[in-house]
Image (cartoon, grey):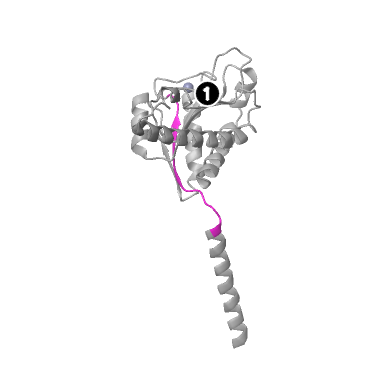
Amino acid sequence: MRKKTIIQCAVCTMMIWLYALAGFCTAYASGSVLIDPGHGGSDKGVELTKRDSEADFTLDVARKIKANLARKKAIKVILTRSDDRDLSIEERKKIVSGSGADLFVSLHINAGFGITSSGYEIYFRGFEQKGQITPDSDNVVDDMIQTRYLNDSIRFSNLVEKEMGKIFARQGRGLRGAPLAILDGLKMPAILIELGFATNHKNKEILLEKSVKDRIAGALSKSIEEYLESK
Ligand SMILES: [Zn+2]
C-alpha cells in the first residue's frame, strides 16, 4: 500500500515537472495593443445603412477584440475611444504616445474609388520619408528605429492579411505604405485597416452580415496574438 502511494506521488511529481517544462518551452503572447476605432460622435464616417455607420462598426469590432483578448492575461488592450464620442486626430495621437503600447491598429471602412473597388486594405507608415534623412548619427539611429517599426508593421500586416483574406476576397490592393495623418510620427509598429468598401455591393453585403464583426474581431485578435507571441 505504502509502495503504491510512493509510486503515485512520483508519477504526480513527474507530471507537474513536465507541465512546467511545456509551459516554459511554449512561447506565449504578451504585451499591449492600442486599438483605434475610427470616427465617432458627430463624425459618423462612411454610411452602411441609415442606422449602420463606420463609427459604430469600428467601435463594435474594437470592443470585441478587447473582449477576445481579455482571456489572455498577459495581453493588455487599450482603446482610443470605448464609446461614441468625438475624438480628433491630435487627441488620438496623445493617447497613443502616452500608452507605451507595442502595437497600434486603427480601424476604418473604405468608400469610393468606383463601385468595383473592393476588399480590405492595410496601410502603414511607408518608405516615403526615408529619402529625406541626412546621415548624421542621430538621424541614423532614428532611421534604424523607424526601419524596425516599419519591418514590424509589415510583419503584423502579413499576419492580418492571412486572417482577413478568409473574410474578404483579396482584390490585389494589398499592403500599402502611406503618409496617413494618424500613423505619422508614431513611435511603435502601426497599421490602419480599411475593412472593406461600403460603396461595393458585395462588400457591403458582407459588412452587414450578422456575424461579420465577430469574424473580423476574431481575425484581428488572432493576428495580434500571433504578433505578440513572436515579437
Ligand atoms: Zn474612416
Residue at position x 58%, y 72% from top? Answer: 14
Q: Which residue is mark 1?
A: 109
Q: Nearer the viewer, residue 125 or 63?
A: 125
- Please tell me in which quadrant of the rendered image residue 38 appears: top left
Where 24 falls versus 185 (above or below)? Answer: below
Question: How many other residues sit within 10 Å of disc 1, few (<14), some (14-19) or many (≥20)?
Answer: many
Residue 128 makes an appearance in the image = yes
Determine the image quadrant of residue 35: top left
Q: Which residues are magenta?
A: 25-39
Judge whether 60 appears above or below 203 on screen: below
**Label 1 near ligand 1 (CB < 8 Å):** yes
Classify 68 as above or below 89: below
Q: Residue 148: give x, y in percent of width and height.
A: 46, 36
Q: Secondary structure at mark 1?
A: strand
Where residue 119 sits: x, y (%)? 61, 24
Asked whether residue 206 is drawn in magenta, I would say no
Residue found at x 64% / y 15%: 116
Report the amino acid beneath label 1: Ile
Give the residue at the far top of this rendering. 114
Point 54% across, 37% down: residue: 155
Q: Is residue 26 magenta?
A: yes
Quarter of the image that includes the N terminus: bottom right
Q: Position of residue 57 (x, y in %)?
A: 51, 28
The image quarter containing residue 117 is top right
* Residue 149 coordinates in the image, percent (x, y): 45, 35
